[in-house]
């Protein structure tokens, strides 16, 4: 990790001193960094680029089935540890790797969802996505095949 501090004195009648602190890191993946900035008025500002934590431990199980109804799948997971996440989206596909469609948006710390009205004899692939505005972090994909026929 390389740290650089640059001090610059503007020329002319302006005698304010500008301090810029930069942090440069060369690593693969998301790198948490923290920098303090001092504005010309003396206020301190903190900028955090912590990575958005993905939900973990996604587990799927067959849901209850009643006569004449479509199938269900129960999803359980450990919620994102990012306290600033806006939501957790339940994403579903019938193809491994997607594309996924959002079937529910839940506020953290939600950690379960029942997906109902599913077709029989179909494999569904799920991902739980933590979101913060345009940023996302996906859990590992899990799949489960629904029952072969109508419930009796």
Image (cartoon, grey):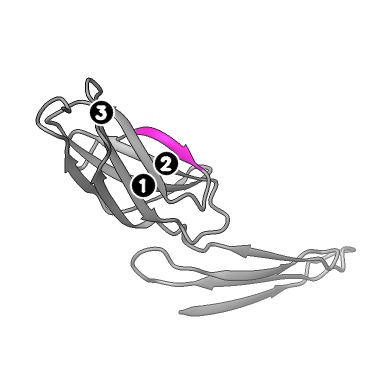
Place of residue 44 in the rendered image (x, y in percent of width and height, measured from the top left): 76, 68
Asked if marks 1 and 2 touch (Cβ < 8 Å), the reply is yes
Place of residue 90 in the rendered image (x, y in percent of width and height, measured from the top left): 37, 40
First reached walking from the N terminus: tag 1 or tag 3 = 3
Camera-nearest residue between 58 and 21: 58
- Could you give the CA–CA distance between mark 1 and mark 3, rounded to whole angstroms? 27 Å
Which circle marks residue 89 in the picture?
2
Disc 3 designates what residue?
66
Q: Residue furthest top?
A: 68
Q: Residue at x 52, y 50 (%)?
A: 108
Disc 1 designates what residue?
128
Write down the region rendered in magenta: 102-106
Camera-nearest residue between 77 and 95: 77
- Could you give the CA–CA distance between mark 3 and mark 2, rounded to whole angstroms? 27 Å
Q: Residue furthest right?
A: 13
Image quadrant assignment for residue 27: bottom left
Asked if marks 3 and 2 touch (Cβ < 8 Å), the reply is no
Quarter of the picture holding the N terminus? bottom left
Q: Residue at x 55, y 46 (%)?
A: 86
Place of residue 36 in the rendered image (x, y in percent of width and height, measured from the top left): 67, 70
**Residue 104 in magenta stretch:** yes
Q: Main secondary structure of the magenta part?
A: strand
Quarter of the picture holding the C terminus? top left
Q: Does residue 73 appear to the left or right of 35 in the view shown? A: left
First reached walking from the N terminus: tag 3 or tag 2 = 3
* Mark 2 surroundings within 10 Å by alpha-carbon count, few (fewer than 14), some (14 through 19), many (20 or more): many
Q: Residue furthest left?
A: 148
Place of residue 71 in the rendered image (x, y in percent of width and height, measured from the top left): 23, 30
């Amino acid at each position: 990790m390389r740290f650089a501090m640059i001090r610059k004195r503007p020329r002319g009648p302006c005698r304010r001193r500008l301090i810029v602190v930069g942090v440069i890191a060369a690593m693969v993946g998301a790198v948490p960094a923290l920098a303090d900035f001092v504005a010309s008025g003396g206020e301190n500002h903190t900028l955090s680029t912590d990575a958005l934590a993905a939900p973990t431990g996604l587990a799927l199980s067959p849901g209850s089935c009643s006569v004449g109804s479509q199938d269900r799948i129960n999803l359980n997971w450990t919620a994102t540890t990012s306290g600033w996440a806006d939501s957790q989206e339940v994403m579903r596909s019938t193809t491994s790797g997607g594309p996924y469609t959002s079937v529910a948006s839940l506020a953290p710390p939600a950690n379960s969802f029942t997906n109902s009205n599913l077709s029989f004899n179909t494999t569904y692939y799920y991902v739980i996505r933590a979101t913060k505005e345009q940023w996302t972090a996906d859990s590992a994909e899990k799949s489960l095949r629904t029952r072969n026929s109508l419930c009796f």
